Image: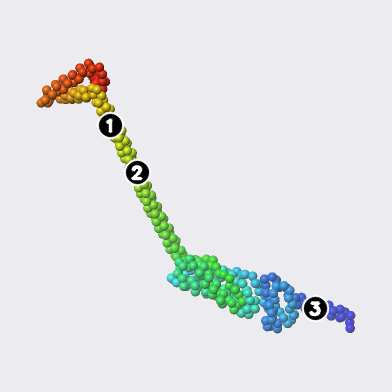
Amino acid sequence: MDPDFSVFVTIVGLALAFIIIIKAIAIVPQQNAWVIERLGKYDRTLSPGAGFVIPFIERVAYKHSLKEIPLDVPSQICITKDNTQLQVDGVLYFQVTDPMRASYGSSNYISAITQLAQTTLRSVIGKMELDRTFEERDLINSAVVAALDEAALNWGVKVLRYEIKDLTPPAEILRAMQAQITAEREKRALIAASEGRRQEQINIATGEREAFIARSEGEKQAEINKAEGEARAVLVVAEATAKAITQVAQAVNQPGGIEAVNLNVAERYVDAFANVAKQGNTLILPANLADMGGMIASAMTIINKTGKGGAGSGADANPHLR
């Protein structure tokens, strides 16, 4: 055998051995799964790490990422229950849970999920009125996820969530909605203003009522204080009168007390007639004028007696005799 041919065969053999070794070793990255087919038939799924594949007999048919994948659902026109068009677009999050089913359950599970998400969204929005579509986004998202998750089970895919990115009604609807919002805000402003005026009137009435009560309480206390003062004044006057009467009674019982009293009465009698004469041109004299003279004579007799008497108590009892 030619030595050069032997070297060539050896080199070719080493090259083939190296290629076979390279083909036999399969290193699967983290969060990935590779589907292995043997002679065109599913054999096994390689998990992350190093694996072995028999060259020319087995091959890596599919490579799947096990990470959560966001999928942009194309924008579409949906018609609501009250026949209003809406431009809706969203995003879908899914994850491959069964690599074998994801490989053989559908020819293209991404396209299948996208189409099903669009049809399900149209169906859900078609059951709602326009106003509810803006209020029930969570309900729409949940309905889409539930429908997709049930169908995607055979595709080896788990639909995690669906989020509506935008709901865009026609321009006419937007203007009508803006006008409605403006009217609602004006209505709330008017209600708030009326409530403020109502509360103001209530506060004023409450303040006036409390002020009236305070004034009436003050007037009541003033009347009570005045009545108590007048009562005390009456008591003081009564006590002074009682003391004066007591002193007069004691003076009357003293020697010459009766005579002093008679003299005082006579003086008051004369003074009364003098005042009547000063106040008018007509003087009315009583019929018993002689009695007045007798009273005056009695007064003079008392003066003479008190002047002669040794006691002099009568003059002391009446200051008019001095």
Could you tell which of marks 3 and 2 lies nearer the N-terminus?
3
Which quadrant would residue 178 be assigned to in this image?
bottom left
- The residue that disc 3 covers is 17
Residue at the image position 67 percent from the left and 81 percent from the top: 42
Where does the image place residue 212, in percent across and percent down from the top left? 34, 45
The label nearer to you, 3 versus 1, is 1
Residue 36 visible at all:
yes
Whether 279 is drawn above or below 122: the answer is above
Q: Which mark is residue 242?
A: 1
Cα separation, mark 3 vs mark 1, equals 150 Å
Question: Which quadrant: the C terminus?
Answer: top left
Q: How far from the left and from the top, in percent, is residue 216? A: 33, 44
Number of the label disc, if any, that sits on residue 52: none
Q: Check disc 3 and give the amino acid type.
A: Ala
Query: How many numbered callouts?
Result: 3
How many angstroms separate mark 1 from mark 2 (CA)?
37 Å
